Image (cartoon, helix red, strand yellow):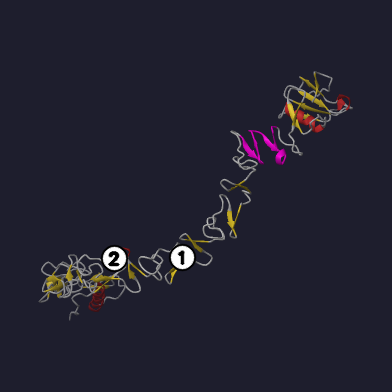
Amino acid sequence: MRTAISRRAPLATLLLLALGLSVTLSGCKKGDAGCPAGQVACGLGCVDTATSADHCGGCNQPCGLGTCSGGACQCEAGAAACPAGEYPRCADTLHDRDRCGATCTACKPGAVCDQGSCACPAGATDCGSACVDVATDPRHCGGCDIPCGGGRTCEAGQCLCQAPRQDCGAAGCFDFLADERHCGTSCATAAACPATATCLAGACTCPAGRTECAGACVDTATDEANCGLCGRACIAGAVCTASTCSCPVSLPDRCTSPERCVDFASDEANCGGCGTRCGAGQVCQSGKCCGPGQQACGTGTARICCDGGCCGDGTCRVAHSNGLGQTYLSCDPVPTYSFAAAQAAANAWLPTGGTDFVPVAACLPGSCYCRQGPVSAATWCYDGVLVGQVSLNTISTACLCPPQGNTSGPWN
């Protein structure tokens, strides 16, 4: 006897029933590798597709309101054959809204199938694409294509705001007591709260530690535009700390007209003081405008620009002759003959690539310093009877003492 199936049973239900029937009829067990002659495997069971009303002519092809004979559905009286698709082949086309009428057409949303014709039920209105209840549908409120916007609902054919929200026209529905977009007492007086603020009892409230200033929630302890009080702005470059404006360590000085924080030590528009501007190509060094390659030496108003660098007392290093046409720098204003001075003189003559010899025994009792170059050698004597003399010869490996060889004369 065929198991009864509802006209619109879900496909999953049909499949489960089909599985139960096929297992019962065929005797196949779950997991069998093959099926008896005349049966095929449908899912986990074996069925006879020639007679199975749930697998008629093939797996998962239910007849619905009909029987299966020879692999073809035979519809019951009152049922009509329809294309299978996802529905049973035999359907009540007089009442089935998914397969309505001779063409087995699906009715539009909200419609019913009445005697083979799709129609809107009592109380519903045909709005073209669907049958709707214009008394409650927010997309068709009071009539077709009349949508309710702004968060309104449709009640008795009218678009209304739900309490406690009030209607603000095109803006929508708002709760003036709690809505940050319209916080206040009415549509006319309500306003949007500042960012991070909340609407409490109809008033915008900034979070703890922040104050509302010109429509924004700010921390007056650190806000440079509202330092300590709303509208109290710090000067340019200043920072707000503990509600007080002050110039930072990087900009310790202060100028007026306009007020701003600057660094007299490095600001080329205010070098050493407000309005002191360095010239073209100059840089501000320690509050002194110096040219390219120069170094600011000294302190305060005594600061000077030096071409050769600074001495410990803030004066400029002095250039001295090395006796061979070059100069070296020293912090001694009067020439002082010493090992360090002799080495500086040698570096001015041949900065690299030489070989140094000290002391030079042949020059005793004086103290000398010799540098041998690729094609010549030079000797500077700085003590004893040969103080301040230098000799240059054309033998690169010979350190000749003055006045031996080609004596160049006084050094320094």
Q: Earlier in the sequence, mark 1 or mark 2?
A: 2
Give the residue type at disc 1. Answer: Ala
User: From the viewer's perspective, is 158 left or right of 392?
Assistant: left
Residue 375 is a magenta residue: no
In this view, the residue farthest toward the bottom is 1
Where's the C terminus, which quadrant?
top right
The amino acid sitting under disc 2 is Gly
**Which one is nearer the viewer's eye here, 318 or 352?**
318
Q: Is residue 62 visible?
A: yes
In the rendering, which numbered label is found on residue 149? 2
Classify 145 as above or below 122.
above
Q: Which residue is mark 1?
A: 197
Q: Nearer the viewer, residue 396 or 379?
A: 379
Q: Is residue 230 above or below residue 42?
A: above
- At mark 1, the secondary structure is loop
Report the front residue among 39 and 300: 300
In percent of width and height, residue 343 lies at 78, 31
- CA gap between label 1 and label 2 equals 26 Å
Q: Residues within 10 Å of mark 1 (few under 14, many from 20)?
A: many
Q: How many marks?
A: 2
Instruction: Give the secondary structure at mark 2.
Output: loop
Left or right: 205 in relation to 275: left
- Range of magenta residues: 282-307
Horizontal arrangement in the rendering, residue 371 relative to residue 37 (left or right): right
